[in-house]
Image (cartoon, helix red, strand yellow):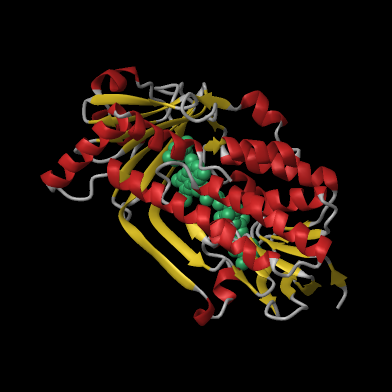
């Protein structure tokens, strides 16, 4: 077998790139194998809000300079129910921890540039990626590169290949348990070069359905509305989107809304999903490959990064101390945080979306909103989870 490395990372999304950069720092050889082209990966528009722990991790990996200069700190999160908007402060109750608006596209670009400068190899456009013998001590990966079959032998495989990837699917069914649910709605998202309607995120529960106001910069805004997941995107003109968004926001917010042509518009389904354990033999799953949260609360990317925090420590211990127990320990550590974050994302989705027209359920949600905004304990629960639970 021609090629060998210590860790093969499958997937060059944010999880795979961050892991690669942290392993480079620790002097551990790694190769990333990615199914898509570099341009495709770098163009994906997704998350927009980083927890403090994610900011710290990117900084410690050496990818924090542009984030420090361009990221926008949010000191509150807003929740609107019909015509009432309440603001939950962040920071004061969370030991100074806040969240930062900085797009996933920028995070991926910063990590990509850092990796390119370090010289570690990333193979894009890899076809038919297969992982082998990860239940033994000599795993390897096989794929097609520029029309030729290639193999890379390694000590460990990191499955950072997202929800639809090959790694989780390669684990025998009887060795993994999956949990989850698909929500009966999707999010229709629109990106525009218009000033954001609010300097902090607004989650709106309205009788026409959920809406979210977010931003990428002071001149670029990101909005979402709850929609039918089977809706055809062609049916949604920009004007139809803006009209519907305006109807779902409190009137004083709607009045401030500045509209413009969309740069991007797409529909995303919403699901909660966890696979456990996140370890099988010499395969370690991280990020969306192991779990998915609905985007309410902005946890997906952050949870991927907290996995990578635990995973790089486990991999370092594995190589430094021949510590095979570090691998199952990674899964236990990561899952403890995963489940709590799954709970919060599920909770905030339930609180802010309309599932059915049941007036009792809506009353329960209004009482809950009153509690989390009027009670110091309620505000603390909201703020502590929103800024991210400690690692
Ligand atoms: P990714 O980003 O899916 O990357 C996986 C990579 O693996 C590649 N791949 C393969 N490579 C080789 N061989 C195979 N067989 C492969 N199969 C797949 C893929 O091409 C891809 O490059 O997973 P990763 O790295 O774990 O990152 C996860 C995050 O991308 C995801 O959790 C977030 O985007 C979720 N998310 C949000 N997270 C936040 O923290 N804050 C937010 O504000 C936020 N907003 C969002 C979101 C996700 C959304 N969508 C579209 C699902 C908003 C939306 C609308
Ligand atoms: C985003 O800016 O894309 C965003 C913000 C908050 C969320 C989800 C997505 O909960």
Q: Is residue 47 visible?
A: yes
In percent of the image, x 50 and y 48: which residue is there? 300
Please identify the quarter of the rendering in which residue 198 is found: top left
Image quadrant occupied by the N terminus:
bottom right
* Vertical order, 246 against 154 (above or below): above
Percent of width and height locating residue 170:
59, 76
Percent of width and height locating residue 340:
45, 51
In percent of the image, x 63 and y 49: which residue is there? 14
* Vertical order, 152 against 380 (above or below): below
Percent of width and height locating residue 362:
17, 42
In this view, the residue farthest toward the right is 2
Please state which of residues 168 and 109 is positioned toward the viewer in this rendering.
168
Image side of residue 369 versus residue 175, left or right: left
Please identify the quarter of the rendering in which residue 154 is found: bottom right
In this view, the residue farthest toward the front is 377
Labels in figure, total: 0
Q: Is residue 13 visible?
A: no
* Vertical order, 95 against 160 (above or below): above
Percent of width and height locating residue 134:
69, 76
């Amino acid at each position: 077998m021609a090629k060998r490395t210590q860790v093969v990372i499958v997937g060059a999304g944010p999880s795979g790139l961050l892991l690669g950069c942290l392993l480079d720092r620790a002097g551990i050889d790694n190769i990333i194998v990615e199914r898509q082209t570099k341009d495709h990966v770098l163009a994906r528009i997704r998350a927009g809000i980083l927890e403090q722990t994610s900011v710290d991790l990117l900084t410690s990996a050496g990818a924090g300079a542009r984030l420090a200069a361009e990221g926008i700190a949010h000191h509150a999160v807003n929740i609107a129910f019909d015509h009432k908007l309440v603001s939950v402060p962040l920071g004061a109750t969370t030991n100074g921890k806040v969240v930062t608006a900085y797009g996933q596209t920028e995070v991926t670009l910063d990590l990509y540039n850092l990796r390119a400068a370090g010289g570690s190899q990333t193979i894009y456009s890899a076809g038919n990626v297969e992982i082998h013998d990860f239940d033994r001590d000599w795993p390897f990966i096989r794929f097609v590169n520029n029309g030729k079959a290639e193999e890379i032998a390694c000590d460990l495989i990191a499955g950072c290949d997202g929800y639809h990837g090959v790694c989780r699917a390669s684990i025998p069914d009887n060795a993994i348990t999956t949990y989850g649910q698909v929500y009966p709605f999707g999010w229709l998202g629109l990106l525009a070069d218009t000033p954001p309607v609010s300097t902090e995120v607004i989650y709106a529960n309205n009788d026409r359905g959920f809406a979210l106001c977010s931003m990428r910069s002071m001149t670029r805004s990101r909005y979402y509305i709850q929609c039918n997941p089977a809706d055809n995107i062609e049916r949604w003109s920009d004007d139809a989107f803006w009209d519907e968004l305006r109807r779902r926001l409190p009137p004083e917010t709607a009045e401030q809304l500045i509209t413009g042509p969309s740069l991007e518009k797409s529909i995303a389904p919403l699901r909660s999903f966890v696979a456990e354990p996140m370890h099988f033999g010499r395969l370690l799953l991280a990020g969306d490959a192991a779990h998915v949260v609905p985007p309410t609360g902005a946890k997906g990317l952050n949870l991927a990064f907290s996995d990578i925090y635990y995973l790089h420590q486990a991999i370092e211990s594995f190589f430094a101390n021949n510590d095979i127990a570090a691998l199952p320990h990674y899964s236990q550590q990561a899952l403890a945080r995963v489940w709590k974050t799954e709970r919060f994302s599920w909770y905030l989705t339930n609180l802010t979306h309309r599932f059915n027209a049941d007036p009792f359920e809506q009353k329960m949600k209004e009482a809950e909103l009153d509690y989390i905004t009027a009670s110091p304990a309620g505000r603390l629960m909201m703020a502590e989870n929103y800024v991210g639970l400690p690692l």
